[in-house]
Amino acid sequence: MAFGYAPARWGSITGASVAAWPPAFSRGLARSPKRRKKSKEKKPLNTKWDHLIEKYTAIPMVIPGLKTFEMQHGRSTDGQGGIRKFLAAHTAQIRYQNPEANVLCRASRDEVEALIRLEMKDGKEYLIDATGKKSQEILREVLTTAGVEPAKVAEAVQLRVAEIEAQHKEREEAARRKRMAGAKMDPDAIPDTEQPVAIEGSAETAGQIADGAASDGAADAGSQDTSDAASKVAADMAGNESIDKLEATGDGGATTKG
């Protein structure tokens, strides 16, 4: 093929040959300059980190002068639940709110005690025994030992308690929905035992219902009395007829005998 040679099937950019090109390419050539400029504009990058930042700053964990925050705990021994929950809830918050601090965590099957070591920039070190303590108690002791203001300590503990209560309610609701789904019932429906008895109207409607029930009872009693009276009259008439028959039979027998 010679240099600069173009096959006839390529055609020309102008003319009727454009109609034979792929539709997408034709639409691209036909785009207006305004639309082309709009498509080339840079859109802001949305990393969707807002929910993470909100989670990392939900509880104030700023520790002034913190150099090293080290935790160690066991995996299966008793008294380790509180520090494990503390680690899961606050490790990321401590790292985010104290970017210059070195945050370490060490878990081992050989560990029996749950310990937290704080090393400050001024050289002071603190050792906290967290064995058998709840996560909110550990939080209070850590912030108090590190020298955080009492008002901020109380705020952090209060937020942690509210977070635990919300998680507990979510677990209960999830368990309830799972039970309802297993029973093939609507999870959003209120159980029959919790359904309020709704009577339309006011107290007057309830009084009318009661009066109607009383009148129905009186009518039933009246009909019962009427039926009893009718049956009594029928019994009396039947008794009179039998007496008349006996008297007639007695008279006839006496006449025949004489």
Image (tube, rainbow, N blue to C red):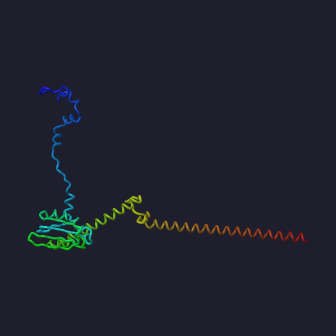
Nearer to me, 85 or 57: 85
At 51% from the left edge and 67% from the top edge, which residue is drawn?
A: 211
Dividing the picture into quadrants, the one containing residue 194 is bottom left
Q: Position of residue 250 (x, y in %)?
A: 84, 71
Quadrant in the picture for the N terminus: top left
Q: Position of residue 249 (x, y in %)?
A: 83, 69
Q: How many numbered dots are placed on residues in this image?
A: 0
Examine the rendered structure and indicate whether residue 26 appears above or below residue 73.
Answer: above
At 15% from the left edge and 64% from the top edge, which residue is drawn?
A: 97
Q: In the picture provided, is 249 more to the left or to the right than 186?
A: right
From this viewpoint, which residue is outermost toward the right? Answer: 258
Q: Position of residue 40 (x, y in %)?
A: 16, 43
Q: Position of residue 61 (x, y in %)?
A: 17, 67
Q: In the picture provided, is 256 more to the left or to the right than 20?
A: right
Quadrant in the picture for the C terminus: bottom right
At 50% from the left edge and 68% from the top edge, which residue is drawn?
A: 210
From this viewpoint, which residue is outermost toward the left? Answer: 122
Examine the rendered structure and indicate whether residue 36 appears above or below residue 257.
Answer: above
Dividing the picture into quadrants, the one containing residue 178 is bottom left
At 47% from the left edge and 68% from the top edge, which residue is drawn?
A: 207
From this viewpoint, which residue is outermost toward the front? Answer: 110
Dividing the picture into quadrants, the one containing residue 14 is top left
Residue 137 shows in the view:
no
